[in-house]
Image (cartoon, grey):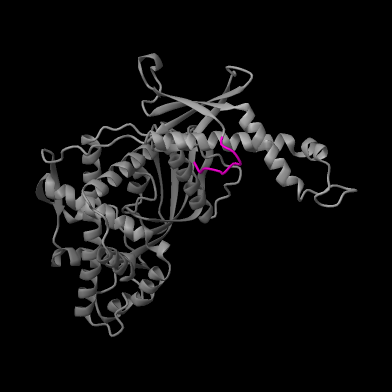
C-alpha cells in the first residue's frame, strides 16, 4: 500500500481488532481489522484545494484554459475529486496505522464504508491479512536419509545401451517377431459383432513390447510372422478412457503385413560421432558420457534431498499462511499453465483454468517461501556472489559457448534471479543437513533414473 500525498491531513481515530478469536470461529488468525474515522471537513478542504488546482488547466468549450467558472469545474469533476481525496486519505491513514503497529500486510486490504457516527465523521473498516510470525522449528531431532550414488563403468554401460536403443534401425525379417521388433499390422476390433469407434486401423506400426498398445494386445504381437492373420479376445480395463469400452470384452482380428527386426548400432567410431565426438575416439566418448551422467545424477540427487528437506521443514514448522498470498500464487500457476499449453500449440482462449486446481500446491509454495525467507534472514544464509557464479557456470556448461552464456546472465542483473534463488535454497538445504540427523543411503541407478527420457 503506497501513501498518496494530500493537501491537508484529515483528523482520524483508529481501533485495531484481531479477527480469529472465539467470537470469529472460522476466520483466519492472520486477519486484522482497522476502523478508520475521517473528518468530513478535512476531506472537503482537500477536495476544494484539488478543484482549485484543477481549475487552472481544465478546458471547456467557450472558455480559455484557467477561465472556466468554478461552479462548472465542480459540476464536472466534483464527484471524481471527492472520491480521489477520500480514497487517498483512507489509504494514507491505513499505511500510517499498519506501520505504527508493525503490521506486515499481505495482499491488499478490503475497505468498506460504515454507517457514520455523526454528520461530521466518515467511518471505514479495513480488513486485511498479515504475514505470520515465524520462529523456525528445531530440526536437530529430525532424521534424513541422504541418497548417494557414484557413477561407475556399469552405469556408463547402461547409459550407452539406452543411447544405442535410441538409435535403433529396423530391417525386414521372415522370422517370428521378437521383443523390440517392429510390426506393421491391420486390425479390426468388434464389440458384440460391431466395429467400435477407434477399433480399426490400416498399416499400424507398433514395437513389440514397446508399451504403445494395451498389454493384452501387445502380447499378441509376440511370435507373429508376416502374412499371418489371428483373432483374439481382449478385455478393456475398468478405468479405460473410453467409457463405452471400459470393462468390456471385445474381439480383435489382426493381419501382420511386416515384421522388422530391431538392429542396434555397434559401439564403434561411427556411433561415437553420432554422440558429438568429432574424431570418433571411444575413450573420449565414454568420458563424455560419464561427465554428462555425473551431472545428471548430481542434479537428481540434489532434487531428491531438497524435496526431503522441504518436507522436513514443513513438518517441524506448522504455520498459517495468508489466503491472499495463496490466491496470488494459484493465479500465477494457472497463468503459467495457460502459457505453457499455448506454447505447445493448444488453443486456450476459451479453455477455463480454475485456480482452485492449484490450491494445495500453491499453499505448499507459499509456506516454503515464508519459511525459507525467515531461515535466510535469521540464520544469515544469504547467497554469496561466488555461489551465484557457480550456478551460472553450471547453467552454461552444456552450451556450445559457455562464456557467452555467462555474459548474457550478467549483462542484466534481473537475469540472475533464478541463480540467486537456487543459491538461497541450496544454503537452506546445507544448513538443514548440517543440523539434522543425516544418514547416507545408497540409491540404485535404475531407480534414480526411472524418469529418464
**What residue sits 82% from the left and 39% below the top?**
72
Outermost residue toward the top?
23
Toward the viewer: 75 or 352? 75
The image quadrant of residue 370 is: top left
Toward the viewer: 6 or 171? 6
Can you say whether 100 is above or below 22 in the image? below
Outermost residue toward the right?
62
Outermost residue toward the bottom?
279
Image location of residue 194, percent across then percent down: 53, 36
Can you say whether 416 is above or below 101 in the image? below
**What residue sits 39% from the left and 31% below the top?**
238
Toward the viewer: 255 or 41? 41
Image location of residue 82, percent across then percent down: 67, 34
Residue 326 appears in the rendering: no
Tell me the chief SS of the magenta region: loop
Magenta-colored span: 1-9
The image quadrant of residue 318 is: top left
Toward the viewer: 207 or 2? 2
Magenta span includes 190 = no
The image quadrant of residue 275 is: bottom left
Magenta span includes 6 = yes
Image location of residue 52, percent across then percent down: 73, 43
Q: Is residue 225 left or right of residue 204?
A: left
Can you say whether 129 is above or below 264 in the image? above
Image location of residue 453, percent across then percent down: 33, 58
Q: Is residue 39 left or right of residue 54?
A: left
Amino acid at each position: 500500500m503506497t501513501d498518496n500525498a494530500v493537501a491537508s491531513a484529515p483528523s482520524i481515530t483508529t481501533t485495531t481488532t484481531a479477527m480469529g478469536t472465539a467470537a470469529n470461529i472460522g476466520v483466519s488468525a492472520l486477519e486484522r481489522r482497522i476502523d478508520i474515522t475521517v473528518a468530513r471537513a478535512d476531506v472537503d478542504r482537500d477536495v476544494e484545494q484539488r478543484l482549485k488546482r484543477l481549475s487552472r488547466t481544465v478546458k471547456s468549450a467557450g472558455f480559455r484554459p484557467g477561465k472556466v467558472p468554478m461552479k462548472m469545474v465542480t459540476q464536472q469533476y466534483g464527484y471524481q475529486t471527492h472520491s480521489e481525496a477520500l480514497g487517498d486519505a483512507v489509504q494514507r491513514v491505513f499505511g500510517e496505522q499498519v506501520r505504527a503497529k508493525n503490521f506486515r500486510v499481505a495482499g491488499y486490504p478490503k475497505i468498506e464504508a460504515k454507517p457514520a457516527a455523526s454528520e461530521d465523521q466518515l467511518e471505514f473498516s479495513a480488513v486485511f491479512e498479515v504475514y505470520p510470525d515465524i520462529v523456525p522449528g528445531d530440526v536437530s531431532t529430525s532424521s534424513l536419509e541422504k541418497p548417494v550414488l557414484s557413477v561407475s563403468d556399469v552405469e556408463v554401460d547402461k547409459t550407452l545401451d539406452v543411447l544405442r536403443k535410441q538409435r535403433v534401425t529396423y530391417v525386414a525379417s521372415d522370422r517370428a517377431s521378437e521383443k523390440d521388433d517392429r510390426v506393421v499390422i491391420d486390425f479390426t476390433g468388434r464389440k458384440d459383432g460391431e466395429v467400435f469407434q477407434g477399433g480399426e486401423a490400416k498399416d499400424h506400426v507398433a514395437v513389440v513390447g514397446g508399451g504403445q498398445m494395451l498389454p493384452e494386445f501387445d502380447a499378441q504381437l509376440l511370435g507373429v510372422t508376416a502374412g499371418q492373420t489371428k483373432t483374439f479376445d481382449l478385455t478393456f480395463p475398468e478405468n479405460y478412457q473410453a467409457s463405452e469400452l471400459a470393462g468390456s470384452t471385445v474381439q480383435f482380428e489382426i493381419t501382420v503385413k511386416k515384421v522388422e527386426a530391431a538392429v542396434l548400432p555397434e559401439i564403434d567410431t561411427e556411433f561415437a560421432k553420432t554422440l558429438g565426438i568429432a574424431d570418433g575416439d571411444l575413450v573420449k566418448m565414454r568420458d563424455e558420457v560419464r561427465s554428462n551422467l555425473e551431472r545428471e545424477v548430481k542434479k537428481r540427487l540434489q532434487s531428491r534431498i531438497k524435496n526431503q528437506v522441504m518436507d522436513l521443514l514443513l513438518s517441524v514448522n506448522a504455520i498459517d499462511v495468508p489466503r491472499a498470498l495463496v490466491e496470488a500464487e494459484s493465479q500465477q500457476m494457472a497463468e503459467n499453465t495457460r502459457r505453457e499449453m499455448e506454447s505447445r500449440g493448444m488453443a486456450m482462449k476459451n479453455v477455463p483454468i480454475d485456480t482452485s486446481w492449484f490450491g494445495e500446491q500453491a499453499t505448499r509454495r507459499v509456506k516454503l517461501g515464508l519459511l525459507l525467507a525467515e531461515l535466510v534472514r535469521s540464520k544469515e544464509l544469504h547467497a554469496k556472489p561466488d555461489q551465484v557464479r557457480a550456478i551460472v557456470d553450471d547453467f552454461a556448461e552444456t552450451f556450445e559457448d559457455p562464456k557467452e552464456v555467462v555474459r548474457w546472465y550478467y549483462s542484466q542483473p534481473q537475469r540472475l534471479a533464478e541463480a540467486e534463488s537456487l543459491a538461497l535454497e541450496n544454503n537452506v538445504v546445507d544448513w538443514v543437513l548440517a543440523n539434522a540427523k543425516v544418514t547416507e543411503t545408497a540409491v540404485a541407478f535404475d531407480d534414480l533414473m526411472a524418469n529418464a527420457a
